[in-house]
Amino acid sequence: MRRTLCGKGKGNTYRDENNVITMEIVNDANAIHEAAHAQQIVRGEITGTGKTTMRHNNLYSEEIEAYKRQFAFDRRNVQNHAPSYWKTPKLISDITENWVIGINSNQDGHSGDFIYAKLVMGINYDPKIIMRVLDDAKKNKQK
Ligand SMILES: [Zn+2]
């Protein structure tokens, strides 16, 4: 069971106990992001009921879709509020799985919890593993 956390856990979208899809938003860019998750609930990619108990078929691809829409609407909002250990996205094509994995709770982009990776990895979560995987991916990209 995993929460939908969107950029430092500010937004949230879920199906409530009355079967109503509910979006908690903090600004317009976040609303664009959360609307993507609402559509994913309608499509059956996110299932379940309850604010903290929604289940995800593929959290990374769901977040890639949501962040691409958010970026298209307001790139600075993503650049300034979704720090990633991977890189700061300059183009919509920079919104990738590694970018989502690298999103973390710290402003400097180099430490803190990797919020989505933590949800996916559960008890096996270890930030050192995430940093090593992303560092290796960066090296391989340069070859
Ligand atoms: Zn999200």
Image (tube, rainbow, N blue to C red):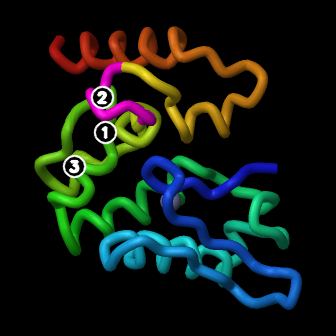
Residue at image coords 56%, 75%: 24
Query: Where 123 sits versus 42, above or below?
Result: above
Asked if residue 105 is among those painted magenta in the image, a careful observer would answer yes
Instruction: Give residue 103's position: percent from left, percent from top.
Output: 40, 37
Residue at image coords 75%, 67%: 51
Q: Of the residues shown, which amino acid type is indicated by label 3?
A: Asn
Q: Secondary structure at mark 3?
A: helix
Instruction: Give residue 14's position: percent from left, percent from top.
Output: 69, 73
Which circle marks residue 80 in the picture? 3
What residue span does the magenta drawing correspond to? 104-110
State left or right for residue 78 relative to residue 50: left
Mark 1 in CB contact with mark 2 (< 8 angstroms): yes
Q: Residues within 10 Å of mark 2 (few under 14, many from 20)?
A: some
Q: Residues within 10 Å of mark 3 (few under 14, many from 20)?
A: few
Spatial CA distance of label 2 from label 3 is: 10 Å
Instruction: Give residue 108's position: percent from left, percent from top.
Output: 26, 27
Q: Secondary structure at mark 1?
A: loop
Spatial CA distance of label 1 from label 3 is: 7 Å
Spatial CA distance of label 1 from label 2 is: 5 Å
Q: Which residue is mark 2?
A: 109
Q: Of the residues shown, which amino acid type is indicated by label 2?
A: Gly
